[in-house]
Amino acid sequence: AGAGAGAAGVGAAGAGAADGGGGGGGGGEADEESDDDDDDGDDDEALTEWNLRKCSAAGLDVLARVFQDDILPVLVPIINAELTHAQWEHRECGILALGAIAEGCINGLDPHLPQLITFLIDTLQDKMALVRSITCWALSRYSRWVVSRHPGEPYLQQLMEQLLKCILDSNKRVQEAACSAFTTLEEDACTELVPYLGPVLEHLVFAFKKYQHKNLLILYDAIGTLADSVGPHLNEPKYIEVLMPPLIEKWNRLGDQDRDLFPLLECLSAVAIALGMGFLPIAEPVFKRCVRLVEQTLLGYAMHLQNPELDPPDKDFLIVSLDLLSALAEGLEGAIESLVASSNLLQLLHECMKDPVPEVRQSAFAVLGELTKHCFAHIEPHIEQFLPLLMLNLDARYVSVCNNTLWAMGEIALKIGAAVKPYVGDILRLLVPIMRQHSTPRALLQNTAVTIGRLGLVCPEDVAPHLDQFIHPWCASMRAIRDNAEKESAFRGVCAMIKVNPSGVVAPFVYFCDAVAGWEKPPEGLAMEFYQILHGFKNSVGDRWPSYFETFPPPLRDRLSQKWGL
């Protein structure tokens, strides 16, 4: 989300507001209304340089976040004076300030937002390009408010229509700001955009004909974010016929060593997942090119190691190609099998798992996890090679690598079942310290817990003796995960372990109860296992149960009584 996110926040980097507003704070520009579509690299340094205008905008954002609505009595008269000023530079400044205080003062501004948002949407048609561009950014700061309004209110549709017009503006700064603002709106609106997909795609695709190099990167991001936001709703022939031709044209035009492939491959990754089987007609050439890019990069790196005088290849080619291969497997599911069968991808993947660059290993393990899910027959012969490499990467210092490693390992465990038994002891010696470390990031804790649960599901006798070493943090990390298939398999594993070693859960039983209570609607079979464990423990306690149950937090007692009859 690099390009789109960059122009979406004053406080995040300070540059957001100034990127949207250009050099407006320094007075008028002679070429303000020229058709600014020639090559756009000449003033990038001026736009990204930290200056007094950006410092002021970032400072105002911080003041708004700290003091919130308390600053409005002082600030509103000043902003109003700027917004109604006859000179466009003052109006542009007022709009920048209005965007800067969006997050900190949203509650106090709420009664006035219907009028303010209407004013800003109208201002997207201002004759001055710098006013239009900063207004795009300011509106992106209020996109959550726009999306949250009642469906009968016109704000979302009006904002979309005007932003789409600005995406096709003749001024490159307006194009950039509008495209970035629309990306933010996509993230907030998600499936609310589905009824408007036709005109949205038509405008974004037409922009391919207008945009120069820099804004093309932002356009790729907007299309990828749209695919992420609407998901399978994009998989309609009428939408595919509009969206895919310009992407394929760019794909065919760019060479294998062109760095402009990076944003295109990232965009195609999101599109491939959204389209699913709708991507199948072009899947083979995309798959083959990605495999070729992986092979070329690995070969170039091997040649560099042999002869350091040779320039090393750019590993980003490796990373984005692996990510697109992962997306293809996720989108096509079993249909990826024939493509994998006729390639040397698994041999290349083995090399990528040993790469010294963490991001390469991270992407490689994502591919391994997807292929394990969807075409395990091709993974199975390589398990003895892959599992030791997976264990080598169970290192919490590299959080993203470790997360993907855990996921791939859990998927493999589910597939090979008891055959993972020879590795369980060594894996647990690596996972239990991660679970018990207080500084472990929450997502890593949850992924570790899921993998331990899955190992317990397939090898309960081997994992259950260690239950008391991890059950407390396991329950604490799993209680807040939303109901899904991964959570179900992990809890089924813990239930299997408790049956083998019930004493392992005696001391932290309240935490197990809390984790069970976190389920909204467990599947019937799992619910029965919960019931048996909960009531089995209650019966084993006997007459002491009422006094023991009284030590539970009241909300937990109520939930357990109502849902589980305790």
Image: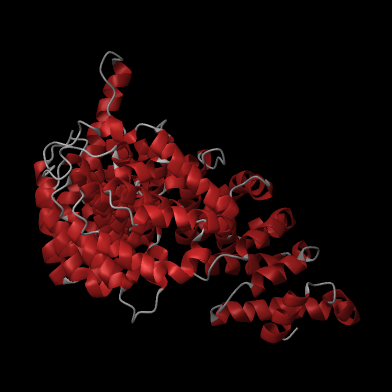
Which residue extends farthest front? 86
Left or right position of 6 against 196: right
Q: Is residue 347 visible?
A: no
Q: Residue 201: name its quadrant.
A: bottom left
Left or right position of 52 against 88: right
Q: Position of residue 355 (x, y in %)?
A: 39, 33
Q: Can residue 510 be seen in this view?
A: yes
Q: Where is residue 465 in the image (x, y as percent from the top left)?
A: 71, 57
Q: Residue 262: name its quadrant.
A: top left
Q: Position of residue 477 (x, y in %)?
A: 63, 59
Which residue extends farthest top? 309
Q: State how the image is colored.
A: secondary structure
Q: Position of residue 271 (x, y in %)?
A: 25, 58
Give the residue drawn at x 23%, y 53%: 268
Mark count:
0
Left or right position of 237 against 105: left
**Viewer-side residue, 505 vs 94:** 94
Task: Establish if 497 lies above or below 419.
Answer: below
**Viewer-side residue, 398 vs 139:** 139
Task: Establish if 45 lies above or below 90.
Answer: above
Left or right position of 526 against 48: right
Give the residue drawn at x 27%, y 49%: 88
Name the quadrant of the C terminus.
bottom right
Give the residue drawn at x 49%, y 41%: 388
Q: Residue 89: name its quadrant.
A: top left
Task: Establish if 513 lies above or below 4.
Answer: below
